[in-house]
Amino acid sequence: MLKFRKLGSQGLEVSELGLGCMGMSQWYGATDDRESIATVHRALELGYTLFDTAEAYGPYDNEVLLGEALKDRREQAVIATKFGFPMKLKDGTTAEADSRPSHIVEVVEASLKRLGTDYIDVLYQHRVDPTVPIEEVVGAMSELVEQGKVRYLGLCEAGTNTVRRAHAVHPLSVVQSEFSVWERNLEDDVLPVLRELGIGLVGFCPLGRGFLTGGVLRAEDYPQDDFRHHDPRLQGANYDQNTAIADTVREIAQARGLTPAQLAIAWALHQGEDIVPIPGTKRRTYLEENTVAAGVKLDAETLAAIDTMVRPGQVAGPRYNERMMAYIDR
């Protein structure tokens, strides 16, 4: 069974690994709701409590799916969802990021209905909205806490200045950002500020969108509607350079009797008790493989080997295309 970690100073306590649910509804190939629900149920059996979703996943479908999976199991789960991400709707139109206080209230009411619950454990602003002062955003979020509709607050991909300003309005429990053995952009500035303020980190994509497992194809080999088709790190010469990094991770893992996924997740867990990785999967087999990482103890030699052979800044290409990188508050 998984152990628990405390995030922030407001009382949020979750399993040391969470489950990222986005891929159950979009971006990573064909969906299978039955297997996805079975994966959520298996996660509960293994001691997972943190389940990560968002209105943008689907859009909307993922919250519905998670709500169905957690029916009659709500008390076992910590549900984290998000608002304020640009979304391509099913009618082909695009809904831009919108963090106006009035819209936040509307979004939360809709999320509650889709999730089939009367409260959200963790509410994130999915991306910082430059058109709305963060003080107004967090002010509206804090009113939802006062009303009992939300328990804890967080931001996603927020920079240090935004985090400080937000935290001054209402304490943040968590900040969510991409964090993995090959995406370590938080180490120099964001992570120190989170620790100064007593805010936990939820790290998504600890497997580098699957690249660190060694099973990812070139971008052009994926269909247009697969996220990986547009991933700069899987394109051209970037793919070749990054494959060498994935090979290094695999070699280190094999030498210690681990899969690459287990090594990558274990590395993330070893970066601090205030960090909770949320590897995403829609299959029980991968969930069970990932969970083994929680029991892996990496010695100083292994951690040093990873730091030496997979250096920050070594990865080729940005983690998103130019349009998506513009939404990162750095």
Image (spheres, rainbow, N blue to C red):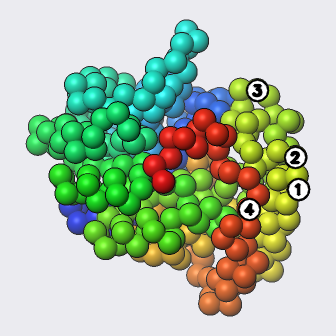
**Which residue is disc 3 drawn over?**
224
Tags 1 and 2 touching, CB below 8 Å:
yes
- Give how far across and how far down residue 145 sits, in percent: 17, 43
What amino acid type is highlighted by mark number 2?
Gly
Q: Label 1, secondary structure: give it.
A: helix
Q: Give the label, 3 or 2, closer to the camera.
A: 2
Residue 103: quarter of image: top left
- Give how far across and how far down residue 121 sits, in percent: 29, 46
**Which residue is disc 4 drawn over?**
315
Mark nearer the N terminus (4 vs 3)? 3
Any part of residue 278 in sight: no
Residue 214: quarter of image: bottom right
Q: Give the residue drawn at x 64%, y 67%.
A: 181
- Give how far across and how far down residue 150 sits, in percent: 22, 41
Q: CA distance from mark 3 to mark 1?
A: 21 Å
What amino acid type is highlighted by mark number 1?
Asp
- Give how far across and how far down residue 31 sits, in percent: 65, 29
Q: Label 2, secondary structure: give it.
A: helix
Q: Give the residue drawn at x 18%, y 42%.
A: 139
**Which residue is disc 2 drawn over?**
236
Mark nearer the N terminus (1 vs 4)? 1
Q: Give the residue drawn at x 58%, y 12%.
A: 92
